[in-house]
Image: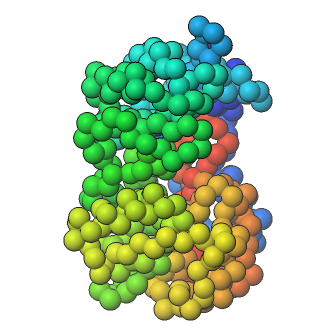
Amino acid sequence: MAHCVHFGICGGCAVDDRTALDKPRLLQDALARAGYADAPMAPLVVVPVATRRRVDLAVTRKGAELALGLHRARGEEVVDMRECALLRPEFLPLLPPLRELLRSLTGLRRAGSVVINWLENGPDILLRLDAECALPDRRRIVEFAKTHGAPRICVAAGRDTPEPVAVLQPPRVTFGGVAVTPPPGGFLQASAEGEAAIMQAVLAGLPKLTNKARIVELFAGAGTLSFALAAHARVEAYEGDEAACTAAEAAARAAGLAGRLGFTRRDLHRRPLQPADMAKAAAVVLDPPYAGAAAQMRFIVMSNVARVIYVSCNPDALAADAGQLRRAGYKVLAATPIDQFPYSGNLESVVVLGR
């Protein structure tokens, strides 16, 4: 029996047997392509199923019929989700009433999406609709939030900036002991367990630090790694997304970390940080998006920083970016594969490199 009734139809899982994919080999092969044939490898960290706390669902409407789920494998049709082995169990009871809410909204005509981040105080929901969210729709959304314990529900038309419609309490996630109110639909690591494994590998990869040591963090998001890093050194964090940067700044101020942790909004693909900005850092930590950090890597190389810690969710991008470090004389000190994407060919990893 398949691990999910949707397997083979829904595009969410690539294999039915989690162990069919050699996840450590994905990291080994990526590093070998970068020129590191014998990189030291830590054991695979296996994140349990039913722990995923983030989902981005598609929704389509055809008359009275409404489908809410992931797209069909290699297709555009939405597979109406009835179960999922990956999601936290709290998600599934929310889906039937969420379908009823969506069916009642005049702001949903043909297609939209629903992003749910399950935070420490409930589901933080972002609805992207294809028409105006009128007053009756807003009333239904507020009532849904009250009934189902959603701290916040935001709405956006298409790709417009999300607008809060129901805010019963500030949605909350904790990074490094600091409470953060993330932006609507904001990026989170797929699971808290995966995030903890990433953090452990990053902190283990830091060099010996003095109290005045400085860490430069790139692609910092809303502070997933930043607040924990700030417990070990002064941190200069850079992030291109305005909403994420604003959320992290507000949390840092509230925690009294001014002078210890600073956030700067900067598009590192268009305006990479320059070598002089990194030259005296004890370490550069980066967690780039899926496509990697090609524009930024050559400036990291030019900075001659002694320690680089690269967090990757894409072995192909890692191979290309780590190749630049290999040609500049860096060696792999540690590499940790983390399987927080069960039943898929995706892999999270943390690679520590030094001169």
The one nearer the camera, 122 or 319, is 122
- Would residue 224 appear left or right of 291 to someone viewing this image? left
The N terminus, quarter of image = top right
x and y percentages locating residue 39 in the rendered image? 64, 68
| Residue 303: quadrant of the picture | bottom right
The one nearer the camera, 207 or 55, is 55
The one nearer the camera, 340 or 37, is 340
Vertical comparison of 177 with 308: above or below = above
| Residue 180: quadrant of the picture | bottom left
x and y percentages locating residue 229 in the rendered image? 37, 70
Q: Residue furthest top?
A: 64
Give the residue displayed 69% in from the left and 32% down from the top: 14
The one nearer the camera, 116 or 201, is 116
x and y percentages locating residue 323 in the rendered image? 73, 73
Vertical comparison of 339 with 100: above or below = below
State how the image is colored: rainbow
Q: Is residue 133 visible?
A: yes
Give the residue displayed 41% in from the left and 72% down from the top: 263
